[in-house]
Image: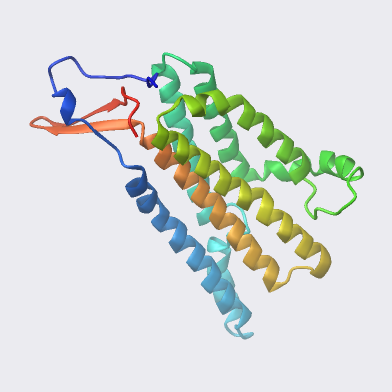
Amino acid sequence: MQQEITDSPPAGTVPESSWERIRFGRTALLLGIPVVVLSLASGLLFLALEKSTAETFDDIHFWFYFFDVGREINVPTWFSSGLWIVAGVMAGFFSRRATAHRRSWLLFAVVCVIFSIDEMLELHERLDVIGYELAAFLPFDLGFVWVIPGGLIALVIVLALTRLVFSLPKGVRNGLILAGVVFVVGGMGVETLAGLTVAANGLTPQFFVLTLIEETCEMAGIVLCVAALAHLVEYKKHDGGTAYRLASRASN
């Protein structure tokens, strides 16, 4: 399989055999640190809020508001939205350098930007209007009905990007597939369970736990996506500093 993206420096400036690929695992672990910190902060503050007294409630709630993964326009939302922009910029750059699947890379970039906006504005919840119409044809309840049109949209995106993903080197391809699975399991699977829970029991602690798992999966999925895209980049340290280029070989 021949990688379709190349962006090499002038011939002879850096030995061809000395280039190294940015490691997927190392990037994922590095970007995963904020995910763990934000999820722990949200969970611990929720526990503190549950055990708070009338005197301490306001102070704890003040900080919980900034780290509650179930809310928008706070630190976790800013982190996720920012990562989507990073992924979109990378995909947009790849679309300029690609010799094949350029439109697919551009679509990838547009999807990332839309997802970034959605993180801040909760656009997906506006799909409830369509979801209620479609839910009438189902023999079971889904809680949050936006997942019905949302799932259809996700399927269309997957089908549109399948050729691009499977044209990439094994490590990048597997990383993107893993990212998509983790994100969808959290964003649709766990959120459906959360919707059923809140429909049956209201805003219970169980609902928050499911929301925490959902948002953690979503953040982890975005991290894996960025790490997989970064795995397309090669680097080489030399006397003048560090040179970078897009991968030109279909290695792992």
Q: Is residue 8 left or right of residue 25?
A: left
The furthest residue to the front: 1
Q: Is residue 209 above or below residue 155?
A: below
List x then y, in percent, for residue 177.
Answer: 52, 39
User: Split into 4 quadrants, where in the image is the N terminus?
Assistant: top left
- Residue 92 or residue 134, whichever sits in front: 134
Query: Residue at the spot x=72%, y=59% of the render?
Result: 193
List x then y, in percent, for residue 110.
Answer: 56, 28
Q: Is residue 78 visible?
A: no
- Residue 2 or residue 207, whichever sits in front: 2
Q: Is residue 26 above or below residue 93?
A: below
Residue 208 lies in what quarter of the image?
bottom right
Query: Residue at the spot x=60%, y=77% of the render?
Result: 49
Query: Residue at the spot x=18%, y=23% of the render?
Result: 16
Q: Is residue 106 left or right of residue 207?
A: left
Query: Residue at the spot x=92%, y=45% of the render?
Result: 136
